[in-house]
């Protein structure tokens, strides 16, 4: 029996280096979760003054969270959204307890869904999937600071900011 997803972000591989900050939040599997996750990401980035690609990051959050709700989180389960401001990039991660890895495909022209990862790939500078220690996977989208007009991250003097809000 797989363990439950918690607000602890753990990876099978080492995390990205950097001196940035992060914030995480757990969300239930609901139809309203993409909206509330977008609001969480927008509020966090606005608080940090990281608004140069806010609309694109909200869009990618919506697509990744929608995929997790539809395909990754079991009924009654949770997903975790992590926002990171790193030295070289801004990053959105969506962690779920599902074992199936997302695949990008080209839907039929008349299809009403199936374009989420195409949108993420076209909007973010990079995206991918990484394994977690424990249940599930992490699907992420990154936005390169050098290419998006964001100011370089200044060395912090008070330590990383994060936690579960």
Image (spheres, rainbow, N blue to C red):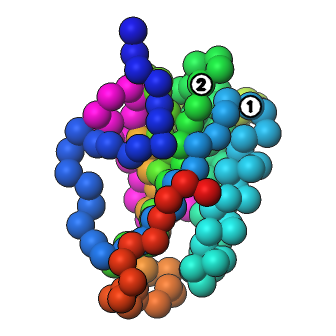
> In percent of the image, x 65 and y 17: which residue is there?
75
Is residue 33 or residue 113 the one in the foreground? Answer: 33
> In percent of the image, x 67 and y 30: which residue is there?
29
Residue 30 circle label: 1
Q: Position of residue 160 (x, y in %)?
A: 39, 73
Give the alpha-carbon distance from disc 1 to disc 2, as whole Å: 9 Å
Q: Is residue 72 magenta?
A: no
Magenta extent: 120-137
Give the residue furthest to the left.
14
Res. 152 visible in picture: yes
> In percent of the image, x 39 and y 83: which residue is there?
158
In the picture, residue 31 is in which quadrant?
A: top right
Res. 118 visible in picture: no
**In the picture, which quadrant includes the C terminus?**
bottom right
Q: Position of residue 17 (x, y in %)?
A: 24, 67
Give the residue furthest to the front.
158
Is residue 118 or residue 141 the one in the foreground? Answer: 141
**In the picture, which quadrant includes the N terminus?**
top left
Give the residue furthest to the top.
1
Q: Position of residue 94 (x, y in %)?
A: 51, 45
> In percent of the image, x 74 and y 50: which residue is there?
36
Numbered disc total: 2
Query: In the figure, 161 relative to 51: above or below?
Result: above
Q: Position of residue 11 (x, y in %)?
A: 29, 42
Query: In the figure, 28 relative to 140: above or below?
Result: above
Viewed as shown, does residue 31 lie left or right of 9? right
The residue beneath circle 2 is 77
**Label 2's element?**
loop
Query: In the figure, 155 relative to 104: above or below?
Result: below
Residue 63 circle label: none
Q: Earlier in the sequence, mark 1 or mark 2?
A: 1
Q: Residues within 10 Å of mark 1 (few under 14, many from 20)?
A: some
């Amino acid at each position: 029996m797989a363990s439950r997803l918690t607000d602890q972000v753990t990876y099978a591989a080492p995390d990205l280096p950097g001196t940035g900050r992060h914030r995480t939040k757990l969300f239930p599997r609901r139809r309203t979760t993409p909206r509330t996750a977008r609001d969480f990401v927008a509020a966090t980035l606005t608080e940090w003054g990281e608004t140069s690609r806010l609309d694109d990051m909200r869009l990618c959050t919506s697509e990744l969270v929608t995929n997790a709700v539809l395909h990754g989180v079991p009924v009654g389960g949770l997903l975790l959204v992590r926002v990171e401001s790193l030295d070289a990039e801004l990053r959105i991660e969506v962690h779920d307890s599902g074992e199936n890895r997302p695949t990008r495909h080209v839907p039929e022209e008349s299809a009403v869904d199936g374009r989420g990862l195409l949108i993420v790939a076209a909007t973010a500078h990079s995206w991918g999937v990484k394994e977690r220690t424990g249940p599930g996977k992490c699907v992420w989208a990154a936005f390169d600071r050098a290419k998006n007009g964001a100011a370089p991250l200044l060395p912090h003097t008070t330590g990383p900011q994060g936690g579960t809000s």
